[in-house]
Amino acid sequence: MKKVTLGVSGSIAAYRAADIASGLTKLGLDVQVAMTREATKFIAPLTFHDLTHHPVATDMFVPVQGLGADHISLARGADVILISPCTANLIAKLACGICDDIVSATVLATMAPVILAPAMNTVMYENVITQENLTQLRKRGFTIVEPDYAALPCGEVGRGHIADTERILGAVRMILGRGGELQGRHIVVTAGGTQEPIDAVRHIGNRSSGRMGYALTEALRDRGARVMLIAGPTTLLTPFGVEKIEVREALEMRDRVLEEIPSARAIVMTAAVVDFRPESPSSRKVKRGDFPSTISLVPNPDILNEIKGDVIKVGFAAESEDVVQNAAKKLAWKELDLIVANDISRPDSGFGSDTNQVTLIHKGGKIEKLPLLSKWEVAVEITDRIVELFKERLSL
Ligand code: CTP
């Protein structure tokens, strides 16, 4: 079981650390919490004790029964250290090597990677001193989960609001995934649906939520891959450590994919690309009375089919009938290594649902029907197959 030391410092965002501690334990990690004295004014150590089932360290000079929780054992035992929230004061101390509390002393004494999730008033965050301290820490290998731009409890609106819990957990997952089977592999994932403009406000689109593709970027990142996400419009949060290019139309997605492919080792096309586009979209909003009774459409290029060269190609097939036969035809025509066939006629599978029942069809003819799984579980299964494909393709 991997071990995380969660350091909590004195910010109002300390309450969010409870959520983070809980999220880390749900990821199957062994979590040990250390708090500064100021943090204990915002949230009780008992909260973390109950969430992590470990005693909580709050003072360098007071041993905790059953833990040996001095800064050295906290520092040595950790696979990763996460400080969340991390105040301006703690950032300044870490940048200077000051270690006068259990959290800063643990960081100075560790060889493990350290992640900081800053949270503070905007002016304090934007102050050149804080920014220079963060630059120093980045140079020394610290990972910073940038705070969000939002309304802050002090009444100001600006940058300084602690990042979303999922992004902070994503940073931990990414760091723990370093050295995984996909370490150093550059993988392109497309997600969401494209939108083909009819006029300045209307488009032809589909119901793709993007969730399957986003889950895949996380599963690949967690195994060490460098992931480039090329996504159509969605409201989903970009996972930590995943680079993202936003696109709208199929032609734009094609161009971005073809630009990325020369440096990539694999592409996973989960995107629901609209197969045709209005031939002459209007650049203005067409008035109701002026709308033509027919819109002439032209076909969009098939992106997967245009990708050639030594790269692993994984496609998805959204099918409502003859699922396996139709998907197998796409596998052959698009020269794929693997296709994930999705029966979208089922209410619990495909567009908009949280679950997917998929059949995996391999290039060599092997067919695997997976049970109904969450999209996250499907993403992990597909990632396992991609790891196998890399093992088979030694040239990549
Ligand atoms: N795809 C693509 N370019 C397109 C259309 C689809 O690269 N213009 C990719 C999808 O991302 C998916 C796979 O091809 O990985 C199959 O997409 P799907 O929509 O199921 O099939 P189509 O090839 O579009 O065929 P049809 O819509 O007739 O089923």
Image: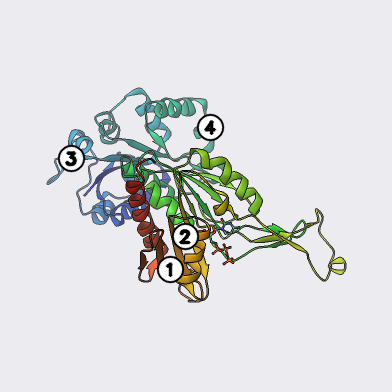
Q: x%, y% of residue 272? A: 57, 60
Helix, strand or loop at mark 1: strand
Give above or below for 350 relative to 79.
below
Q: Nearer the viewer, mark 4 or mark 2?
A: 2
Q: Which quadrant does the C terminus fall into?
A: top left
Q: What residue does disc 3 label? A: 69
The dot on residue 3 is none
**Separation of disc 3 and disc 2 at Cα?**
41 Å
Q: Amino acid at mark 3?
A: Ala
Q: Amino acid at mark 1?
A: Asn
Give above or below for 51 relative to 180.
below
Q: Are marks 3 and 2 in contact (CB under 8 Å)?
A: no
Tell me which numbered mark, 3 or 2, is placed earlier along the sequence: 3
The dot on residue 212 is 2
- List the single residue furthest toward the right: 290
Tell me which numbered mark, 4 or 2, is placed earlier along the sequence: 4
